[in-house]
């Protein structure tokens, strides 16, 4: 808390865009003890965010993941009628509006007109680089990507991606703020499509779809390969630590022995074609065979409970 | 147990090659109640396998992962002096010898000479297809790949990969045996390099190394992206279920919206170059910065305890 106070100097956090992602961020900051102002251009979404956060808090409480009452967390949230109200005096804005370059640019122009001289602006975008919507403004050096995984109050990773305009003090502030509110910071040092997280997901998914297309394995068998195999280690070590421990001589030993095989595998696969309508139908049919369309919502609730159980377990592991 | 009895008709399982992988398999079968015969061409390895399994049993007991005493499991193990002794009357051989085509071929020739007419032979190879070492023999239709993740008594996935010679009854038997002893069976329907598991790992690792090479992120930040982000969902859902739940309209909706981005990412990356000595040194230096070389062994023990804790938790989740 002490570190947070010195970072924000007691000033609030503004949440701009109050859908699922924005509401999740509001809970992250409020849970950490910060005053949070919530604004969405659509008042219906602003107003819906509080009951949404109440449900999220109830879930976290059930899994023993909160150290204080719902009331004290909710008391830190204020819904604002205007963008000006939300950002006035704020230390940091977390922007989670529509994933479109023109929409984000329009918000940056608005913020440029009203932002105080030291307001720092983080964007939740999962793939649009800041240089595509935040350049040539007085705020340009204070805009940075802070890309979460949903929901950010459960899954801790956040990708911090500066644009070439972003100042090093803004990078340092944002990373320190995120660590102080409990996130796990990944520094992405260059603007690349998909940043790190979605690049890793992209190559794995493309291979997975290609294996289905070739009839090598079904979706369900590929899912099993990950959830009953690869995913176990990856849930507490990353891929580098995994291979570092998997060879007597560590990662260099592993690279020399398995590098050529992996190069051959990766190089043998091209990804120039779209997923065809037939392939999409194959995957869709296989998935619907396992889970009917009208069961998706129930399964999403199951996933969220699994993530909460995982989070509770991780906390115990970290205390060991 | 009933199903196991009808599968094996009370006949033992033979373990050929009694290193880390073979010993792990011995425990899988013995834990399930089957008599297990252990053989290694090197008697020192055969003899070392029993104390190794004793330590594995002690670990599992500590984490509450066994339902009977060490003694009753160990009583099912017999170390054999010859291959003949090990396979005589056995229902199934699990081969875990050196990962080299000529060495595996030599074993197949030996087995061809002594195997009973219905002996089924599974190979633990992580990447050599059965057709490369088991063709044109009387046993050819009874040889199949059963590729585990280490250690198989903890991580349940096993890839079942027939060669074009493998009969459908042998596929069915091996899959049923593996399920009956508690493994999670992935059917790989065609012989492809790396099967499914190592293909998925290969493409993710190649992208990870390329990101380090380009200075986009450090090893540690890439590891964080997975262990504090992507890996959470992948540890209880696979990649297909993950995306199926991540779009309102399910997997087809997801494919239409994010397919083009993922294609662009995967297609932009070529993997024709080897990992250079400089790159390997960069990764090695970064890893050794986090974990000194002489700490590797201690960290492996930590990993194994994490896997046991994960296994114990998974068991609880499955019972919910």
Image (cartoon, coloured by chain):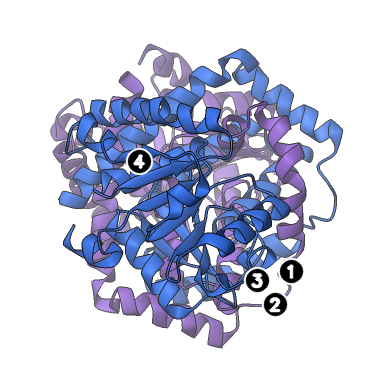
Chain colours: A purple, B blue
Q: Is residue A1 above or below residue B276?
A: above
Spot occupied by residue A125 in the image (x, y as percentages of width and height): 54, 51
Between marks 1 and 4 in the image, the one whose residue lies nearer the viewer: 4
Q: Nearer the viewer, residue A238 or B93?
A: B93
Q: Name the residue located 29 percent from the left edge and 73 percent from the top edge.
A: A291
Q: What's the chain of the residue with tag 1?
A: A
Q: Is residue B49 left or right of residue A143?
A: left
The residue under label 1 is: A270
Whether marks 2 and 1 lie on the same chain: yes
The residue under label 4 is: B27
Q: What's the chain of the residue with tag 2?
A: A
Quarter of the image where one finds residue A247: top right
Q: Are marks 2 and 4 in contact (CB under 8 Å)?
A: no
SS at circle 1: loop
Q: Are marks 2 and 1 in contact (CB under 8 Å)?
A: yes
Between marks 2 and 1 in the image, the one whose residue lies nearer the viewer: 1
Q: Name the residue located 80 percent from the left edge and 58 percent from the top edge.
A: B270
The residue under label 3 is: B135
Q: Are marks 2 and 3 in contact (CB under 8 Å)?
A: no
Whether marks 1 and 3 lie on the same chain: no
SS at circle 4: helix
Between the C-alphas of marks 1 and 3, the distance is 31 Å
Between the C-alphas of marks 2 and 4, the distance is 45 Å
For label 3, the crowd category at 10 Å Cα-Cα, with few meaning under 14, some 14 to 19 and many 20 or more, is: some
């Amino acid at each position: 808390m002490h570190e947070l106070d010195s970072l924000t100097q007691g000033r609030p956090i503004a949440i701009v865009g109050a859908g699922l992602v924005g509401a999740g961020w509001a809970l992250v900051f409020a849970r950490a003890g910060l005053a949070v102002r919530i604004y969405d251009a659509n008042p219906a979404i602003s107003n819906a965010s509080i009951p949404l956060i109440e449900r999220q808090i109830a879930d976290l409480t059930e899994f023993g993941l909160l150290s204080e009452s719902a009331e004290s967390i909710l008391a830190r949230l204020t819904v604002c009628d205007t963008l000006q109200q939300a950002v006035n005096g704020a230390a940091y804005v977390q922007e989670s509006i529509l994933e479109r370059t023109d929409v984000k640019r329009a918000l940056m122009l608005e913020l440029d007109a009203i932002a105080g001289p030291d307001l720092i602006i983080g964007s939740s975008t999962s793939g649009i680089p800041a240089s595509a919507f935040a350049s040539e403004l007085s705020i340009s050096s204070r805009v940075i990507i802070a890309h979460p995984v949903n929901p950010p109050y459960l899954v801790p990773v956040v990708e911090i991606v500066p644009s070439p305009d972003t100042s090093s003090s803004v990078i340092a502030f944002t990373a320190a703020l995120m660590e102080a509110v409990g996130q796990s910071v990944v520094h992405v040092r260059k603007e690349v499509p998909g940043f790190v997280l979605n690049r890793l997901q992209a190559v794995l998914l493309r291979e997975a779809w290609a294996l289905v297309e070739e009839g090598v394995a079904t979706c369900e068998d590929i899912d099993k390969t990950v959830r009953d195999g690869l995913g176990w280690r990856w849930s507490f070590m990353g891929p580098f630590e995994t291979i570092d421990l998997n060879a007597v001589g560590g990662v260099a030993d592993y690279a020399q022995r398995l590098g050529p095989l992996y190069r051959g595998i990766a190089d043998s696969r091209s990804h120039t074609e779209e997923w065809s309508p037939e392939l999409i139908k194959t995957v869709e049919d296989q998935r619907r065979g396992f889970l009917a369309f009208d069961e998706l919502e129930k399964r999403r609730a199951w996933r969220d409970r699994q993530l909460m159980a995982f989070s509770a377990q991780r906390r115990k592991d970290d205390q060991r």
